Amino acid sequence: MDIRASDRIAEERVALRRVAVLAAGGASPEVVFGAVTAEVRRLLGADIATMARYDPDGSMTYVARWRATGDFREAIPRTPLGGQNLSTLVFETGRPARMDDFSQATGPAAEVVHRLGIRSGVGVPVRVEGRLWGVMFVSSTGEEPLPRDAEARLTDFTELVGAAIAGAQARVELRGHADEQAALRRVATLVAGGAPPAEVFAAVAAEAGSLLGADETAMARYELPDKAMTTVALWSATGETLEAGYRTTLGGQNVSTLVFETGRPARMDDLSRVSGPAGDIVRKLGIRSSAGVPVSVEGRLWGVMTVASTREDHLAADTEARLAAFTELAGTAIANAEAQAALAASRARIVTAADAARRRIERDLHDGAQQRLVTLSLQLREIQAAVPPGAGDLARRLDGVAAGLDDALEELREIARGIHPAVLAQGGLRPALQALADRCSVPVDLHVQVPAARLPSPAEIAAYYVVSEALTNTARHAGATAATVEVTYGEGALRVRVRDDGRGGADLAHGSGLVGLRDRVEALGGRLAVGDEPGAGTSLDVRIPLGGSVRGC
């Protein structure tokens, strides 16, 4: 071996070691690509060294390129494969290739070669875990072809490149998996916490778009009879605030319509053929590729989740699979919301039916048994008036019957008030609460600030029974000396607060009366909370939404 050859081998080993240190140290693929092309160009004395990645659509993307005067600064677009050129030969054969005369080169890659004045070159495949990933080639603009051992010397470097890419991909996949799990966990926490569907939709759109590197994401609900869709969430990588709620007719060739028609994931990487109303939006946003996944709720097609890219690079091949995990959570949130809405509606129907039954019973008592007792009492008074003066024993006995009849009538009236207070139906909430305060054995400070017009009947009834139950507990169990009742209306809700200065001890878990009140309030979409500290009294706070419906306002 001559001195020149040994020097060349030593220099080559030093260069390989520098690249190996970079790869082993976890350098990004881009850094390794640049280092390899620079080392190869210098060692082989080439004018240009290039590395490119083969893409799934039959084209290649340049990832690094060096020439004798330094790194290329101009952007090089993706180049389709085909024709007679080094890149295509390596792609088709999977083996090293050489062209010592580029005058006969053809195809899109040859156009780049001719523009750069390249006359000869050598290309070697870059493999990652056994599969063809890309190509590395060195080129000469001079008349002399590259050395005969150029292919073998290039191979050593491409093996390091393959190892670096594999390691980087493993790190990226691991980090991506962790990021994906974290994103899914954040959305799942919202779903488990019963967050409103709109909040879940917005979170799904943002998390999925950010994780998948999309430029735009959207979720839409299909309106099946009309063959249309309404957006429920939008997200943009630019940070631009987008409002959901616009409605679009389905039809034509676009991802949303494909998902609607097939019920399966769909993808369009060539949007030159996109059509239909949704396609008009795609063109307006400058989208170049998109993918969509159906959102299903308990087995039925509910809507679609789409992600889109405005860049030349297509969305990743696993986009649909990763997106499906988010749409499953969205489907769960929708199912939960529908179940909660159905439960609330069912509870509201039960409460309404119970109130109607109470009113009917109260009416029956008032018009039936109560009126019958009043009539009997009047008849008894007439009999008392006809008793002779000497029949003292009979008069006393009749007085006892009359007193008992009066007590029975008052007891029946009290029962009727408990079932459904007539004063509430006749006069509204203010006089009904005043009657409760007047009857309570504990002094009550009453403050009622509600519209003169009547509130919705379910809200009035709920507020009445909240105050009634609270004052009953105060009088019987709290040992209180005073109570305060505050009832106010504002911001579309009725608020009720009852406080006492008793011993405390109220517990929703052990009081059937309070549990029944909570069910009644929650059936109207409201909330009931108990504040209780031993020795500091008890407070009952209730908020009942009215939906803006106040009769007469």
Image (spheres, rainbow, N blue to C red):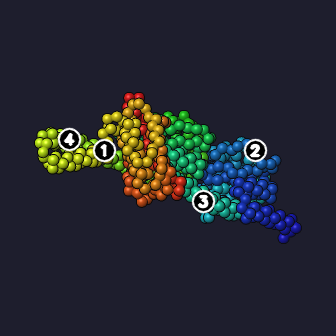
Query: Nearest the camera: 177 or 242?
Result: 242
Q: Which residue is mark 4?
A: 374
* Type of amino acid under label 1: Arg
- Counting residues from the start of the chain, the first of labels 4 and 3 encountered is 3
- Counting residues from the start of the chain, the first of labels 3 and 2 encountered is 2
Q: CA distance from mark 4 to mark 3?
A: 79 Å
In the rendered view, would you say 21 is above or below 422? below
With 309 as the anchor, is 156 left or right in this view?
right
In which quadrant will I find the C terminus? Answer: top left
Q: Which residue is mark 1?
A: 417
Which dot, 3 or 2, sits closer to the camera?
Answer: 3
* Type of amino acid under label 2: Arg
What is the x, y in percent for residue 542? 46, 46
Labels 3 & 2 near each other (Cβ < 8 A)? no
From this viewpoint, which residue is outermost toward the right? 3
Q: Which residue is mark 3?
A: 178
Seen at 27% across and 42% down, the residue is 359
Query: Nearest the camera: 185 or 104?
Result: 185
Which dot, 1 or 3, sits closer to the camera?
Answer: 1
Q: CA distance from mark 1 to mark 4?
A: 17 Å
Q: Which residue is mark 2?
A: 73
What is the x, y in percent for residue 337? 43, 49
Q: CA distance from mark 3 to mark 2?
A: 35 Å
Which dot, 1 or 4, sits closer to the camera?
Answer: 4
* Type of amino acid under label 4: Val
Which dot, 2 or 1, sits closer to the camera?
Answer: 1
Q: CA distance from mark 2 to mark 1?
A: 89 Å
Element on which disc 4 rests: helix
